[in-house]
């Protein structure tokens, strides 16, 4: 059974940093592209970032480009999201999700981790 | 960026009735369209990909149709567990984008 477990969320001050982790199990992690998607309070789902299976290619939403960095450690079956220069509008539940078998739809989702940016 | 527009924002339906949700793309996404279901406090769940292919374990009462810019998710007979928010997602171009969601509530 595919399992994705996010961690690392919490309270951060504006301008601060957090690093999210997503621990994967139940599938061959190194074979799958991965994405981060967030759900802000009162808003809809927003795609944040994606990384290919080998980690050689990354994509970002304009809203986080230059501030967030996606990476992965295939030896540890773990996905990361380094979040710098945090803003109040980054407050959201952050989900990791696997890429679909045939394309970049979000297939299996984790339970999410809450990030709150506030002074 | 491809903008995804869902309608209606809220759909009030009685259990056992049919629900029809719409999703429109600002430009063609071919069949690169997925539908996700999200209940409060839970992770999203993939229902449909490729516009019409049900994901593993998704009941047959969920069906997707459309291509290009106009898509529909139909729930043939609403069950109590189907009351949730539904999002469409295009994955033909970067950035990946979601619609604003349709909340299906009990009438």
Image (cartoon, helix red, strand yellow):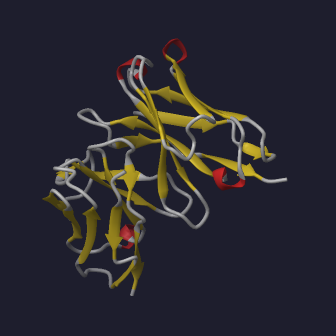
Q: Residue at x 20, y 54 (%)?
A: B28
- How many numbered marks are there? 0
Q: Kindly identify the residue that appears in the image at 22 percent across and 78 percent down.
A: B18
Residue A79 in sight here: no
Quadrant for residue B103, please give it.
bottom left
- Is B95 in front, or is A109? B95
* Image position, residue B12 (x, y; %): 37, 84
- The percent coordinates of residue A80 (x first, y second) are 58, 28
For the point 47% across and 26% down, the residue is A25
In the image, is residue A86 above or below residue B68?
A: above
Q: Is residue B23 above or below residue A114?
A: below
Q: Is residue A18 visible?
A: yes
Is residue A101 placed above or below A31 in the rendered structure? Answer: below
Query: Horizontally, is B32 left or right of A63 in the view?
Result: left
**The residue positioned farthest toward the bottom in the image shown:** B107
Residue B25, percent from left and from top? 27, 60
In the figure, residue B62 lies in which quadrant? bottom left
Quarter location, residue B73: bottom left
| Nearer to the camera, B79 or B93 | B93
View extreme (right): residue: A119
């Amino acid at each position: 059974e595919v399992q994705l477990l996010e961690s690392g969320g919490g309270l951060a001050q504006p301008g601060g940093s957090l690093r999210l982790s997503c621990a994967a199990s139940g599938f061959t992690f190194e074979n799958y592209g991965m994405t981060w998607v967030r759900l802000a309070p009162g808003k809809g789902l927003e795609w944040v970032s994606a990384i290919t299976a080998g980690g050689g290619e990354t994509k970002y939403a304009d809203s986080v480009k230059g501030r967030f960095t996606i990476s992965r450690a295939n030896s540890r079956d773990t996905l990361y999201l380094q979040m710098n220069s945090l803003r109040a509008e980054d407050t959201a539940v952050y989900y990791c999700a696997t890429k679909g078998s045939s394309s970049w739809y979000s297939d299996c989702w984790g339970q999410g981790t809450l990030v709150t940016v506030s002074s | 960026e491809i903008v995804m527009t869902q309608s209606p924002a809220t759909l009030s339906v009685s259990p056992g009735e049919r629900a029809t949700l719409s999703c429109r793309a600002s430009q063609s996404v071919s069949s690169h369209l997925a539908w996700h279901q999200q209940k409060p406090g839970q992770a999203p769940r993939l229902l449909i990909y490729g516009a019409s292919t049900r994901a593993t374990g998704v009941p047959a009462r969920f069906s997707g149709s459309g291509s290009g810019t106009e898509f529909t998710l139909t729930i043939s007979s609403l069950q109590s567990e189907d009351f949730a928010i539904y999002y469409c997602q295009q994955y033909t171009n970067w950035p990946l984008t979601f619609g604003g969601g349709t909340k299906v509530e009990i009438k």
